[in-house]
Image: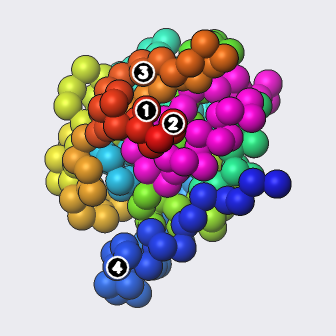
Amino acid sequence: MPHEPSVENHARRDKSLKKSSNLLQQVEQAAEIVERGGVIVYPTDTVYGIGCNPFDAKAVRRVMEIKSRENKPSPVLVSGLNQLNMVADPLDMEVEAALRVWPGPVTIVMRKKPNLPDEVTAGEPTVGVRMPANAIALAIMQRTGLPLLGTSANLSGMQPAVTAQQVDEKIKTRVDMVLDGGKTLYQKASTVVRLSEKGLVVIREGVLSEEEVRRRLFG
């Protein structure tokens, strides 16, 4: 049985949750909003995300309307292997890859679970999944027991936000909460990859180059 990717070290290094009881209260509030079908803006290690319960098709449609985004798949964030198995049917090689690069800025495209709404994947049979190295995002998911829709908090076609202040007012006024976690760690989108028996395909280079991803996966 593979071990869960380590969350504790990242939580200890990320002091943001310990800055004030107010932030802890905001995490609790954000979790409650997600549980009741709401939409939040939240920090990750890469860019700010706009998210909801990915199993709530109505909430997912609302996110797409807020972003003015149609017919494009969205990634899903998870807090560990248990939540990964809620949204995807990963191959053994994909689980092994996740253990090598998570938590971190690598999204892995896998076959989706049938109960994950088509609104998330734009009807595609696959979904991009990632475990972020951000204590706030992880705390929300751990509190709810649910993954989070992980699309970036920007209008479709615009640059992603790396601070809460950079999130467009058109988004801020239409979501239920904006959780300010300061500037993101990497300030750049994640690298997106797909694995198969034929090898690694880098769909989008982001924080990590293809060379660095290959080094982490294959040594």
> Amino acid under label 2?
Phe
Magenta-tinted stretch: 91-118
Dot 4 corresponds to which residue? 15
> Amino acid under label 1?
Arg
Dot 3 corresponds to which residue? 202
> Amino acid under label 3?
Val
Residue at the (38%, 84%) spot, across then down: 18
Mark with earlier residue (2, 4): 4
Tell me the crowding category of disc 1: few under 14, some 14 to 19, or many 20 or more residues within 10 angstroms, Cα based. Answer: some
Secondary structure under the numbered disc 4 in the rendered image: helix
Is residue 151 in view from this perspective? no
Mark in the foreground, 3 or 1: 1
Dot 2 corresponds to which residue? 218
Mark in the foreground, 3 or 2: 2
Secondary structure under the numbered disc 1 in the rendered image: helix
Q: Tell me the quarter of the picture where residue 134 sits.
A: bottom left
Secondary structure under the numbered disc 2 in the rendered image: helix
The residue nearer to you, when weighing 52 against 112, is 112
CA gap between label 3 and label 2 equals 14 Å
From the viewer's perspective, tell me whether residue 203 is left or right of residue 209: right
Mark with earlier residue (3, 1): 3
CA gap between label 4 and label 3 equals 32 Å
